Structures are given as structure tokens and as C-alpha cells.
């Protein structure tokens, strides 16, 4: 409990942005982290999937496994940082700003909204582990109905998008001294413990 309080004190109303390939556990780690730190969980994927119900072009784009284009990301997701109901709250972000160049917009919007990014966590898994977890998710239906979960081709595109567009984002956070890499092929509890331990080190 003392360690959690240390992390909460260090984080304040700041943000932690979590990245990883599909099925790396971003939302799982993010929601659990938000819970223990009394923060708010903000998933750009969830925000965009909600918006796609009103935007056929966005829906087709995302169901293919491609990232939403930057203009849509900026107009739909970034305004959340200025939401009044988030004032003074710590934010746990799930892959907010996954396309190279978007990270600068996210860093600015988070800071302007009173939620400066204090760390970026990279949950690292292999492509084979991502496919294994996709199969499990399909069998258990624990992610709801998502068009981009349904076939291997979409997963391959999502991994390619991550490698091409998101790895440079992580390099930016690394250059800023904010990146924390967590090996994440293990169980949810083991991965979460690694995240907590890494954050404790940031408070020292």
C-alpha cells in the first residue's frame, strides 16, 4: 500500500500512456492501474470505436486493422484531455497517439489539460503470443464484437502498423526519458507486478 501511495504522489494529476502490439494487455493493465491509483482510464481505441458507429469511413478503416488517420484522431480523441470531469484526475491512457507525429500532439494536449505525461509503458510481446491471445479471445468472446479481431490478416496488418507507425512514437518517449519497457508474455498478475515495480523505481 505504501508503494501505491508513492506512485500516486509522484503521478499527481499526470498521465501514464500504455503502448503495445495487439493483445499485449494495454486495456487490462490500464484499467487495473487506474483502479489502484484512483485514476481515470482513457482508451483512444474505445473512443474511436464509439465514434465509428457514426462514421462509416472510420469504421471500415479500423475493421481492416489500420490505424485511424491522424486528422480523425486529433478531432475525436485529443479534446478529452480538456474535459472538465477529468480535472485534477490522474489519467491512465491506452495507446493514445499511436501514429508517428501524434505523440507531440498528445504530449501538448495532456500538458495543456493539466495531465502531463509522466511515463510511457511499452508492453512487449511476440507476434506469436499476440496470435495465441487472439485465438483465446475469440473463443471466450471477452473483447466483445470487434471486426479487427476476426481474422489473421487484420492482426498482421495491426502488427505491421505498430512496427511502422508506433515504434517511432516509442522512440520519442525514450528520447524524452519517459519510456518503460515491460516484457509481457507472462501472466496478467506477473506483468502487472512488473509495471508497479517499474513505476516505483520512477519515484526514487
Image: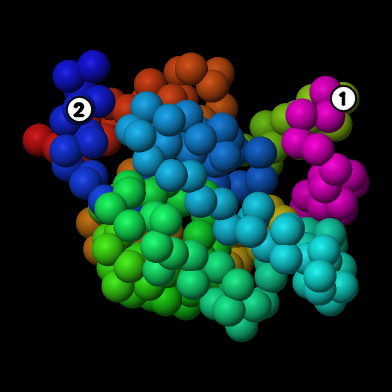
Looking at the rendering, which quadrant does residue 26 occupy? Answer: top right
Q: Are marks 1 and 2 in contact (CB under 8 Å)?
A: no
Residue depicted at x 46% and y 51%: 93
| Left or right side of 173 for 159 | right
Disc 1: which residue: 139
User: Which of the 4 image quadrants contains residue 144?
Assistant: top right
Q: Quadrant of the N terminus?
A: top left
Magenta-colored stretch includes residue 155: yes
The circle on residue 5 is 2
Vertical order, 106 against 174 (above or below): below
Highlighted magenta segment, given as a residue range: 140-157
Tell whether 120 sits left or right of 135: left
Q: Is residue 17 at all visible to an observer of this figure? A: no
Q: CA distance from mark 1 to mark 2?
A: 38 Å
The mark that comes first in sequence, 1 or 2, is: 2
**Relative vertical location of residue 165 with respect to residue 201 in this rendering, above or below:** below
- Identify the residue at image location x=42%, y=56%: 85
Question: Between tags 1 and 2, which lies in front?
Answer: 2
x and y percentages locating residue 37 in the rendered image:
33, 33
Q: Secondary structure at mark 2?
A: helix
Amino acid at each position: 500500500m505504501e508503494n501505491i501511495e508513492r506512485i500516486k504522489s509522484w503521478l499527481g494529476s499526470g498521465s501514464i500512456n500504455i503502448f503495445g502490439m495487439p493483445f499485449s494487455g494495454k486495456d487490462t493493465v490500464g484499467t487495473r492501474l487506474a483502479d489502484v491509483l484512483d485514476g481515470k482510464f482513457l482508451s483512444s481505441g474505445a473512443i474511436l470505436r464509439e465514434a465509428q458507429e457514426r462514421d462509416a469511413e472510420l469504421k471500415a478503416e479500423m475493421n481492416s486493422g489500420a490505424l485511424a488517420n491522424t486528422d480523425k484522431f486529433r478531432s475525436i480523441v485529443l479534446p478529452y484531455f480538456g474535459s472538465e470531469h477529468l480535472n485534477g484526475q490522474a489519467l491512465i491512457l491506452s495507446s493514445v497517439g499511436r501514429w508517428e507525429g501524434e505523440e507531440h500532439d498528445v504530449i501538448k494536449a495532456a500538458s495543456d489539460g493539466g495531465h502531463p505525461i509522466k511515463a510511457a509503458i511499452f508492453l512487449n510481446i511476440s507476434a506469436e503470443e499476440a496470435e495465441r491471445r487472439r485465438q483465446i479471445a475469440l473463443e471466450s468472446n471477452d473483447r466483445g464484437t470487434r471486426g479487427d479481431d476476426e481474422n489473421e490478416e487484420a492482426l498482421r496488418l495491426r502488427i505491421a502498423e505498430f512496427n511502422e507507425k508506433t515504434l517511432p512514437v516509442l522512440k520519442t518517449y525514450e528520447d524524452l526519458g519517459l519510456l518503460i519497457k515491460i516484457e509481457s508474455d507472462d501472466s496478467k498478475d506477473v506483468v502487472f507486478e512488473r509495471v508497479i515495480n517499474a513505476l516505483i523505481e520512477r519515484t526514487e
